[in-house]
Image (cartoon, rainbow, N blue to C red):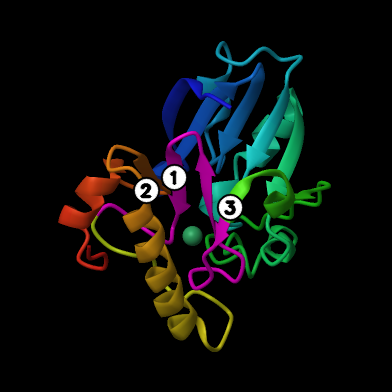
Amino acid sequence: MKIEQFQVLKTSGLFQTNSYVFKSTDKWFVVDPGSGIFGPLMGLVPVDTILQVLLTHAHYDHIAGLVELARNWKIQLFVSSEDAPLLKDPELNFSRQLGNPLVIDYEWLDIDEHFETVAAPGHTPGSRVIIFDGHVFTGDVVFSNTIGRWDLCPLHNAKWLMNETIRKLTKLFNSLPNDWLVLPGHGKIVTVSELFTLNPFFKR
Ligand SMILES: [Zn+2]
């Protein structure tokens, strides 16, 4: 499935979350809708569309825009089974700590059954790397020049899990074409080859 009309939207205010929007085979996809996504999406995506919303993980700054989307479009929500409980729990999705408790109780589908994903636990229990037509969405697990925090994860072995994840993703990135894009939840988008130059956690 080819990606068309690809756009990066900066959302969630101070957090500057990268929300990604694209069209593929006449369907519209949103990865990690942050707060403020409604404005830029209006005019781009027709209102009678069913939006396929894919979550790399269920932290507040990556899900806050779901409410805006659900008000204006029909949505089909895809998340990992381990991160789905975070949607309904303002403590675990960090919305309460950020002063805006958020409970998302929409129906969801298991992202692993519908898309190409790699389990990448450590930042959250159910973080996923999503691979779609040469685009690798890494959420808050891998950034252009560093990796995500594991100390926010409620699992006691999160640091160990993160290490395992980075080892697994090193193999993955080494197996991918150099010009594929690595699209993190925040900050700069890089190619696979740039990642190996910029990010000290990844070695050829
Ligand atoms: Zn996060």
What residue sits 60% from the left and 47% below the top? 116
Q: Is residue 23 above or below residue 154?
A: above
Return the residue found at the far right.
107
Residue identified by numbered label 2:
176
Tell me the quadrant of the picture where the N terminus can be found.
Answer: top right
What residue sits 68% from the left and 53% below the top? 112
What is the C-alpha distance between the residues marked 1 and 2? 10 Å
Residue 117 is tagged as 3
Q: Is residue 204 left or right of residue 150?
A: left
In this rendering, the label closer to the viewer, 1 or 2: 2
Of labels 1 and 3, earlier in sequence is 3
Where residue 149 appears, as percent x and y from the top left, is 40, 70
Magenta stretch: give its range. Answer: 118-144
Where residue 53 appears, as percent x and y from the top left, is 66, 38
What is the C-alpha distance between the residues marked 2 and 3? 14 Å
Q: Are marks 1 and 2 in contact (CB under 8 Å)?
A: yes
Where residue 16 appears, as percent x and y from the top left, is 38, 44
Q: Amino acid at mark 2?
A: Leu
Q: Is mark 2 within 8 Å of ligand 1?
A: no
Of residues 12 and 194, which is closer to you in this image? 194
Q: Is residue 137 above or below residue 80?
A: above
Q: Is residue 138 above or below residue 177?
A: below
Q: How many marks?
A: 3
Label 1 secondary element: strand
Give neighbour class at mark 2: few <14, some 14-19, many 20+ (Cα, 10 Å): some
Residue 68 is tagged as none
Q: Quadrant of residue 26?
A: top right
Residue identified by numbered label 1:
136
